């Protein structure tokens, strides 16, 4: 029996409606409407955790049962906001321990919006508890975490959607269908991807006492325990490799995942990368400020470049990808795309879709990415449709693993100074014992690294 059924009297609105119709067929014009509201829990109530949850609330009848965060202030604020958003008006149960949240509640869906170093353990525990999962990108901080996450999703037969919502971005869906799939580019044999945002947060805050409202030990979890130097939320934690994989892991994963989707690419045959801290040496940050990576495929290279200093090579596309074909070029980002034909053909431009009039509550939401909201709504609908049909969503956990692991392997190449060839069947780096030793990070005492053979 399906978990969900369709209410044909309730319609989506805005540009999302047209895309839902084209993506899901006739049923796409209906909200997925269960006999009872979907029971939802959120782990990690910061900026993007709440943003994902609010988009889900906008497209499906849900009851947010429980929230979890190790920051009591952030958790309490989220509880109030959710009560204002959800139909019941109830404040969800509030937890400081996600395992207690999972054990005390029977949930249909768990959203995970914690920092990267927590994603693997929480996703695996959530599917074991019987929930389908929406997990933010990158899915993991090491390759073997990702292997275990895929194994867990398959073993417990749960849908796991990764928050790489570029694949649900209206104008990028249009670009794939009407530019790439239509053959306007011809043979594509070179791709460039980039991020030139100054987003490294290279500061020197002093070490201080941990505030009473934050459980810093639990925030750190399996990662190394850094001296506490201020609230880690939003951008500060991302400036340290202890909790993620730098800007390659944070920003390249989006662009590379989108390119793989558009061009139907699997694992790269070889990955190489160089870079380091070349300019911004004055702060504590230990992620690269300059990095290049090459993801190789037969007769195709996908090249990544980021700098957290200087100017972008194209001011209109500071975070983007470019597909170079024999018949033309496609520039694309979260904000627009431009097709430039070879010769005298017609140029094509399309902008991001906003739905401000249809969802006026978006305009009142703190720190919302208005350009991403329609994409996330459609991504949530795709997630729900996959649950309904027992199928794989557009950003299935295995696809998220390939994109995430490829970015992690680029960092390993930069660290070892050698190209990386990963064998996804044997789950090992070919002919490199040192690099193989880096496929799983050490966990802190009392935390056990997940094993794909024993999830």
Image (cartoon, grey):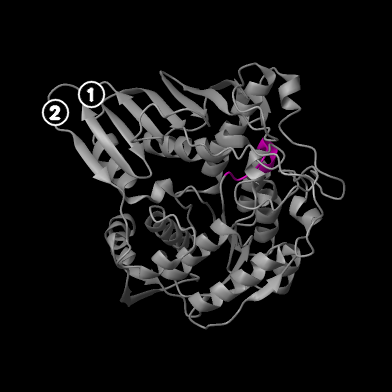
Is 454 within the magenta? no
Q: Which residue is mark 1?
A: 327
Is 143 within the magenta? yes
**Residue that protrudes farthest toward the left in the picture:** 344
Where does the image place residue 165, in percent across and percent down from the top left? 45, 50
- Cα–Cα gap, marks 2 and 1: 9 Å
Q: Secondary structure at mark 2?
A: loop
Neighbor class of circle 2 (other Cα within 10 Å; few <14, some 14-19, many 20+) is: few
Q: Which residue is mark 2?
A: 345
Which residue is at a point 34% across and 59% down the rendered structure image? 24
Contact check, label 2 and label 1, Cβ < 8 Å: yes
**Which of the 4 image quadrants contains residue 373?**
bottom left
Can residue 149 be spotted in the picture? yes
Counting the numbered discs, the total is 2
Pick the residue in front: 315 or 178: 315
Query: Looking at the picture, does residue 78 appear above or below residue 257?
Result: below
Which residue is at a point 23% across and 23% down the rendered structure image? 327
Which residue is at a point 32% across and 68% down the rendered structure image? 12
Side (left or right) of 338 relative to 440: left
Where does the image place residue 160, in percent across and percent down from the top left? 56, 54
In the image, which is nearer the foreground, mark 2 or mark 1?
A: 2
- Chief SS of the magenta region: loop
Neighbor class of circle 1 (other Cα within 10 Å; few <14, some 14-19, many 20+) is: some
Side (left or right) of 206 relative to 367: right
Side (left or right) of 390 relative to 98: left
The part of the chain drawn in magenta is: 138-145
Which residue is at a point 75% across and 21% down the rendered structure image? 434
Query: Looking at the picture, does residue 214 appear above or below residue 334?
Result: below
Mark 2 and mark 1 lie on one chain; the one further toward the N terminus is 1
């Amino acid at each position: 029996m399906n978990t969900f059924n369709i209410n044909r009297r309730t319609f989506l609105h805005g540009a999302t409606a047209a895309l839902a119709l084209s993506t899901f067929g006739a049923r796409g014009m209906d909200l997925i409407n269960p006999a009872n509201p979907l029971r939802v829990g959120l782990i990690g109530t910061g900026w993007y955790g709440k943003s994902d949850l609010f988009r889900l609330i906008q497209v499906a009848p849900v009851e947010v049962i429980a929230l979890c965060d190790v920051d009591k202030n952030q958790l309490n604020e989220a509880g109030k906001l959710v009560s204002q958003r959800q139909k019941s008006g109830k404040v969800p149960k509030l937890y400081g321990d996600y395992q207690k949240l999972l054990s005390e509640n029977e949930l249909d869906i768990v959203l995970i919006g914690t920092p990267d170093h927590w994603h693997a353990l929480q996703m695996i525990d959530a599917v074991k508890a019987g929930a389908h999962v929406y997990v933010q990108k990158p899915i993991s901080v090491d390759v073997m975490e990702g292997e275990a996450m895929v194994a867990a999703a398959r073993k417990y037969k749960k849908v796991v959607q990764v928050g790489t919502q570029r694949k649900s971005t209206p104008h990028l869906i249009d670009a794939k269908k009407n530019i790439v799939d239509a053959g306007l580019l011809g043979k594509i044999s070179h791709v460039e991807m980039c991020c030139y945002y100054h987003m490294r947060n290279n500061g020197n805050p002093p070490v201080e006492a941990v505030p009473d409202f934050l459980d810093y030990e639990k925030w750190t979890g399996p990662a190394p325990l850094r001296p506490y130097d201020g609230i880690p939320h939003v951008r500060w934690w991302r400036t340290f490799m202890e909790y993620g994989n730098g800007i390659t892991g944070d920003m390249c994963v989006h662009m590379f995942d989108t390119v793989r989707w558009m061009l139907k690419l699997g694992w790269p045959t070889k990955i190489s990368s160089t870079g380091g801290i070349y300019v911004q040496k004055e702060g504590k940050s230990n992620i690269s400020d300059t990095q290049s990576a090459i993801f190789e495929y037969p007769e195709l290279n996908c090249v990544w470049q980021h700098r957290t200093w200087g100017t972008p090579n194209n001011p209109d596309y500071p975070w983007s990808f470019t597909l170079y074909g024999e018949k033309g070029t496609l520039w694309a980002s979260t904000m627009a795309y431009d097709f430039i034909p070879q010769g005298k053909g017609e140029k094509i431009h399309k902008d991001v879709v906003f739905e401000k009039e249809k969802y006026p509550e978006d305009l009142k939401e703190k720190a919302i990415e208005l350009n991403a909201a329609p994409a996330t709504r459609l991504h949530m609908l795709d997630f729900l449709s996959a649950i309904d049909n027992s199928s794989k969503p557009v950003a299935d956990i295995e696809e998220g693993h390939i994109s995430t692991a490829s970015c992690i392997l680029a960092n390993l190449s930069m660290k070892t100074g050698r190209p990386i060839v990963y064998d996804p069947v044997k789950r090992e780096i070919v002919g490199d014992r040192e690099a193989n030793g880096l496929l799983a990070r050490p966990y802190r005492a009392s935390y056990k690294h997940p094993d794909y053979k024993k999830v």
